[in-house]
Image (spheres, rainbow, N blue to C red):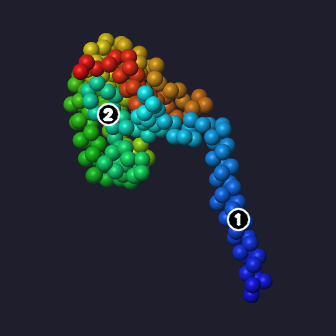
Amino acid sequence: MLRTLRPALVLFAALTLLTGVAYPLAVTGLAQVLFPEQANGSLIERGGTVIGSALIAQAFTGEAYFHPRPSMAGTGYEANNSGASNLGPTNQGLVDQVAARITAAKEANPGNYGGVPADLVTASGSGLDPHISQAAARWQAARVAKARGLDLQRAVALVYEFTSPRQLGILGEPRVNVLAINLALDERFPLAH
């Protein structure tokens, strides 16, 4: 019996070492060499303190900040609770959520008479998407400009400055990283306290 069991145990140990130790270490090492920023979470630091990640949305609610997409991740933007609502387009719960978000967006952005961009009222698949569309950022620009005492054109120019193009020129849509643009607002146009 031991003669039959021995090859199975040796194979089990070898594959465990190969797929459970060697392969993960090789991939992690390669990632650290080729993509160190991304491999370490694309962390953003200010004054030696980590304040966020370029890959995970954060809640911004003040008038002087661009707001991210809504989050369905726990109580909001919890990386350990990532996920979508899984509500279908005909689900009354989703319809009610979107209607409430449209009302809230219009109240927070008076003077915007056009339709609210979809990404401001619908959560992403992960609930943690750090980007909004350029249209969503432009839609909020008047509120942000007014709250910061900026000319609207200056706020819109900032939106264009922080717009990332399609990946490889064809994938996705132009997008604005909410954390990056809000940090730039605080650095360039600090709020009076």
Q: Quadrant of the N terminus?
A: bottom right
- Label 1 sits on residue: 15
- Label 2 sits on residue: 60
Q: Is residue 176 left or right of residue 97?
A: right
Q: Which residue is nearer to you in this view: 55 or 115?
A: 55
Element type where label 2 sits in the image: loop
Q: Which residue is nearer to you in this view: 17 or 144?
A: 17
In this orientation, does residue 89 appear?
Answer: no
Q: Residue flagged by tag 1: what amino acid is it?
A: Leu
Q: CA distance from mark 2 to mark 1?
A: 47 Å
Q: Which of the two discs, 2 and 1, sits closer to the camera?
A: 1
Relative image position of residue 176 (x, y in whole percent): 44, 28
- Report crowding for label 2: few under 14, some 14 to 19, many 20 or more residues within 10 A (C-alpha): some
Q: Which quadrant holds residue 39? A: top right
In this orientation, does residue 13 appear?
Answer: yes
- Tell which circle, 2 or 1, labels the residue nearer the N-terminal end: 1
Relative image position of residue 147 (x, y in whole percent): 25, 20
Q: Is residue 34 left or right of residue 119?
A: right
Q: Is label 2 in contact with label 1 (beta carbons under 8 Å)?
A: no
Element type where label 1 sits in the image: helix
Q: Residue flagged by tag 2: what amino acid is it?
A: Phe
Q: Is residue 26 left or right of residue 50?
A: right
Relative image position of residue 46 (x, y in whole percent): 43, 28
Judge whether 130 appears above or below 21 on screen: above
Q: Quadrant of the C terminus?
A: top left
Judge whether 193 appears above or below 81 on screen: above
Judge whether 138 appears above or below 124 on screen: above
The residue shown at (31%, 30%) is 115
The residue shown at (42%, 51%) is 80
